[in-house]
Structure formats: structure tokens, C-alpha cells
Image (cartoon, rainbow, N blue to C red):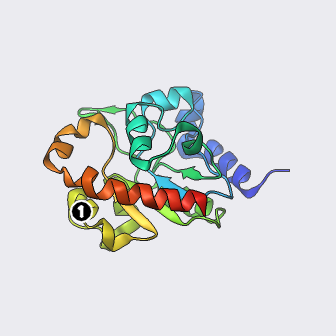
Amino acid sequence: MPTNLDRIRAEIVGHQSNAWARDLGYEPIYSVAPAARIALIGQAPGRKAQESGVPWDDASGVKLRGWLGVDDEQFYDPSLFAILPMDFYYPGKGTSGDLPPRRDFAGLWHERILGELPDLVLTILVGGYAQKHYLGERAKPSLTETVRAYAEYLPCTIPLVHSSSLNFRWHARNPWFEAEVVPVLRSLVAEAITA
């Protein structure tokens, strides 16, 4: 018997705004289960993830799992992590990396999906798109300032920079991230998945 999450997924696949993805044989890339403890909200799947059907299936995913302090089995267990990008389909290539997620996508689907996940205790916001959507006026003027102010959003939410290798200059300029934020992140994740 289909669950509400099954029905929402069918609506996403059948929605007119996603006809182009359906025509290409793309499935929506996200992973959720009612028992999920952590919502991981990122940008949009990359090309490799869209082709494999596995979210964060690239070098940035390996780095992210290192920050979180979890292995692949834990990360891909939907009873631990609900993986919800701001768009569930690869948006295509832009002039300087992948195109951004569609603006209205998360507004159409996230609230309904998250409403089916009553056990969430932590939301991780990866990148500026997720932070602007979820923090609204509480977000700082820049991603760096928002991440630097991570303590303001604890204990239920933590903002992160994207783990893409393209951000190597950001990491070189902001060594406090791995020194200060990552240990707090690991502690929050460990507590959430063992509670």
C-alpha cells in the first residue's frame, strides 16, 4: 500500500515542470524515510549523481561524509539521513559550474516531505541556496558570515559551506571552518544518530 511519501514521489515525477527530466529518463534524486533523524539539505544533484541515481555520489560526497564523521552505510541509511537537495534533478552545466537549483522547486515539495519525517532532530544546510531558503532573514549577508555564525542556529540547525573541490580557495581563506565547525558538526551528527 503506497505511503504519503510514495504518493509525493509519484507527484514529483508526474509534475509538468519535471516533464523534461522524465523524458530523459531521470529519476528524482533524494532519499527519505519516516524514521530519519537528520535532514541534509543541499543544492542539486550533480551529473554523476543523476546518472547513478545516488545522491552525493562524487568527491564532494566523500568529503562531506568525512566532515559528518559517518561512513557510506550510515550516510545512505534513510532512517538516519533524509537527503533533500533544493532541486531533485541535475540542473545542467553553466558557465562556471552547474546551474543553480530551480527557485520554486523546494517550495513545492520540501515542506510536504519533511512533514512526513516526525523524528528529525538536526537540519544541515549545505550551501547558500539551502541557507537562504531555510534561514530566510536569519541568514547573514554572505555564506561565509552565515557559516561563521553557525552557533546562532544550534542545536537544531547547522549551516555548512559546500564540500565541492571548487571551494578550495574558500577553505584556504577560512581555516576556522575545519578547526571549529566540523568538530561541532560531528558531535551533533553522532548524538542525532545514536539517540
Instruction: Say which residue appears at 32% left-offset and 73% top-offset.
Output: 152
Side of 3 relative to 183 (left or right): right
Q: Which residue is mark 1?
A: 148
Quick one: SS at disc 1?
helix
- Of residue 57 and residue 173, the one placed in the foreground of this image is 173
Q: Position of residue 62 (x, y in %)?
A: 42, 35
- Of residue 12 and residue 154, the one placed in the foreground of this image is 154
Q: Position of residue 114 (x, y in %)?
A: 59, 62
Instruction: Say which residue appears at 69% left-offset and 46% top-offset.
Output: 10
Q: Position of residue 93 (x, y in %)?
A: 34, 31
Instruction: Say which residue appears at 31% left-offset and 65% top-offset.
Output: 150
- Amino acid type at image mark 1: Arg
Q: Position of residue 41 (x, y in %)?
A: 46, 53
Residue 54's image quarter? top right
Q: Is residue 155 above or below residue 1?
A: below
- Of residue 113 and residue 64, the one placed in the foreground of this image is 64
Side of 78 relative to 70 (left or right): right
In the displayed image of the protein, which residue is found farthest to the right? Answer: 1
Dot 1, how many residues are within 10 Å of its Cα: few (below 14), some (14-19), or many (20+)? some
Q: Is residue 91 visible?
A: no
Q: Is residue 194 above or below residue 21?
A: below
Q: Is residue 168 visible?
A: yes
